[in-house]
Image (cartoon, rainbow, N blue to C red):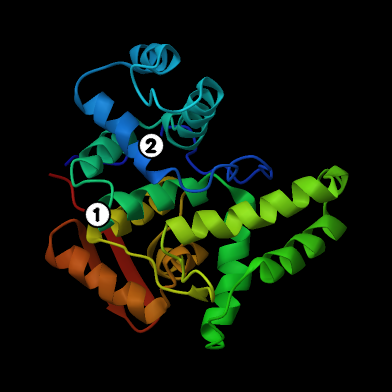
Amino acid sequence: MDKRIDKSLTKIREHDHYSLRNTIRAGCIYECWLFLNELVKGKGSNKIRRDLADGVILGNYAFSTRMALWKIFRVRYLNISDPWVHSELISASRHGPESPEFISLLYLYFILRDRLAFEFVVETVWSKWLAHDLSIGSEDCSRFFTELLQQNEIIQKVTSESKGKLIRNTISTLHDFGLVTGKKHRVISRPPIVLRTAFHIVRLLLLEGLSGKEIVESKDWRIFLLDQHDVSRMMTKLSQEKWIKYEKSGSIVILEVCNE
């Protein structure tokens, strides 16, 4: 795996605006795996889209559903400009649609590209997790969204029906990715994360100009409900695997990517 950082790449994170459609069909984990599996076979994106339109792929889905799923996949993952991320997603898909390698990476790039879901997790969900209040539901997302409406003029135009769908879909999406578990009584759970996914976070933060202590203290780790002690242990494991160089002495943190 190429661990070098190309700082000429355009940004990966999409948090300059709120998306109101990115959770419309929840996690779409199986469908995204299927699309990536087609890329594994060597098909280009145009060929996959044609096969979807013709019913060669997901032929038991309605045409509108197939095209909506493709749009979600394109917006969440295919539009990422970094070819390394594309190759990593394809590689992770080889572990299967239910593997932690695949789900954790899919979850990471979904939430990095959905500001509303990101802020809900790193603020509301994180606060409840710290307070050991693990119950979670649409009412929590509704309160978060109501506060957001008061602060953002653009979102104020959302209809009550659209707001309801967005709230339900956000919880459903987080359920698909493992942050929320249970059916009748939903609770907060730590979603799966593997070392490779942790390295993706480190790499992203380096790309964005952060270093050392800033990386360890980043809110991004809250996506996986990891506190600074958890992150420090994760950095130690990455260092042992020679993916990064990590040294910590008091408040001083040295963190670099190991080049092959």
Q: Is residue 77 left or right of residue 131?
A: left
Q: Are marks 2 and 1 in contact (CB under 8 Å)?
A: no
Q: CA distance from mark 2 to mark 1?
A: 14 Å
Dot placed on the residue nearer the N-terminal end, 2 or 1: 2
Disc 2 secondary structure class: helix
Q: Residue at x 49, y 74 (%)?
A: 188
Kindly identify which numbered label has been placed on residue 31. 2
Between marks 2 and 1 in the image, the one whose residue lies nearer the viewer:
2
Q: Name the residue type under label 2.
A: Glu
Vertical order, 41 against 182 (above or below): above
Pick the residue in front: 152 or 75: 75
| Residue bearing the label numbered 1 | 99
Vertical order, 137 against 99 (above or below): below
Q: Name the residue type under label 1.
A: Ser
Q: Is residue 161 left or right of residue 36?
A: right
Pick the residue in front: 141 or 243: 141
Residue 94 visible here? yes
Q: Residue at x 24, y 54 (%)?
A: 99
The x and y percentages for residue 215 are 42, 63
